[in-house]
Amino acid sequence: MSHSDAMTEPGLRDLLAQRRFMRYWVSRLTGGLSNQMLLVAIAWQMYEITGSAWDLGLVGLYQFVPALLLTLVAGQVADRFNRGHIILGCFVAQAVASAVLWFAAVDGWLHRELLLALSIVLGAARAFQMPAQQALLPLLVTERLFPRAMAFSAGGLQVSVMGGPALGGFLFAAGAPVVYGVCLGLMLLACGLMLRVKIAPVAPSHEPVTLETVLAGVVFVWRSKLLLGAISLDLFAVLLGGATALLPIYAKDILMVGPWGLGLLRAAPALGALVTSVVMSRWPLQEKVGRKLLASVAVFGVAIMVFAVSTSFWLSMAALALSGAADMVSVVIRQTLVQLETPDEMRGRVSAVNTIFIGASNQLGEFESGATAALMGPVAAALVGGVGTIGVALLWGRWFPSLARRNRLTRE
């Protein structure tokens, strides 16, 4: 980069001056906090009512299946209609769910079937919200500000993921109606802010909706080796290296720190990710981003290997925080490339494909960790996963040379 380029490179202050982006960011933060609180409260309420681990599992399943089935359709919708209005509609659906839960908790008619039905509503809302959110961000800032915006947005997401469950658990001590009331208030605030995010109307598409148009995002990703490499890298890295499912075993049997230690272990990756997102908002990556993406995945694998063999609680915390930091570098690079390398008329459908890959990696990764731990024990399972993740980084460098050679986040 030349000296003149450095002088004109927009900074964090320029990003914070973007009013539309900041309204969107705060709406996403408040909506995310409400959603995370709601998910924790529903799960807790289900177990309190039924005492059944099976019903607790059904809550997660009823949220996941609609999200999986509807995401490709949601991508098509995001490319045909105003993305801001779609997100607003999803917020309204979640606000209605919060209101129903509040009334049910106050009047005493909260029951298993209602919780399962509202879990379906929340899963469907998530299916339409995720592609629209990912595809909306490039319309709110310039391309040169986009890497900072992506890092800043990812930081807000981490705040909601960390703070939502903790706040929900704290408020639940005051009673279920308090939790649902706060969820409703936060979601209404998110709705109000989204109403003030003005987006240019989408040009109406005269192309008929067919299976071909719905699957156009899949075809686009398959033909773009850069995007295919970036998205599949996350799938296989998290599939092999994710250790979240093993944390209860480590907390109870290996580190022997009990429930309080489990809570800290679960928070450690999010803390590392949050710190990294703040740093990347201030100092975004400038050069050799392809190599840095692959290196971040390899560092993630190394961190999981350290966690696997550690018998020290604080070393385990540090390793998990490092894994979260490395994952955040990967997330920002991948998400930025996916959005900037995709034409706007395709962003919703490509974002839907990306959402499916992310969801699959998380869900299947937990299953893979549990299955391998059952076969070879938790330490060996985590260790093999870390080694496998490093192997993925090395292989992807060879199989996707355009990704490895990518120099800048913005289009070259």
Image: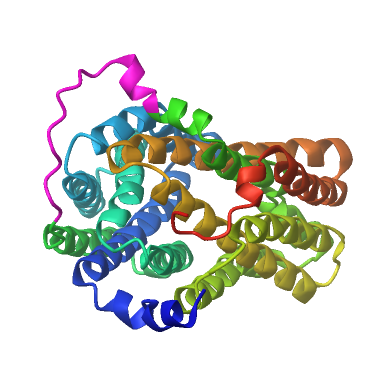
The percent position of residue 10, horizontal first and vertical second, equals: 36, 77
Tell me the residue at 28%/63% (across/down): 141
The reply to whether residue 52 is visible in this rendering is no
- Residue 214 magenta-highlighted: yes
Q: Which of 4 and 134 is in front in this view?
A: 4
> Image check: 269 left or right of 148?
right
Q: How many marks?
A: 0
Height in image: 31 above or below 129? below
Region of the chain picked out in magenta, as a range: 199-216
Quadrant location of residue 374?
Answer: top right
Tell me the residue at 76%/68% (across/down): 316
Q: Is the magenta stretch mostly helix, strand or loop?
A: loop
- Residue 229 magenta-highlighted: no
Tell me the residue at 62%/67% (across/down): 325
> Image check: 20 left or right of 122?
left
The reply to whether residue 350 is visible in this rendering is yes
Q: Nearer the viewer, residue 133 or 311?
A: 133
> Image check: 341 left or right of 129?
right
Height in image: 169 above or below 383? below
The percent position of residue 90, horizontal first and vertical second, equals: 24, 45
Q: Nearer the viewer, residue 203 or 392?
A: 203
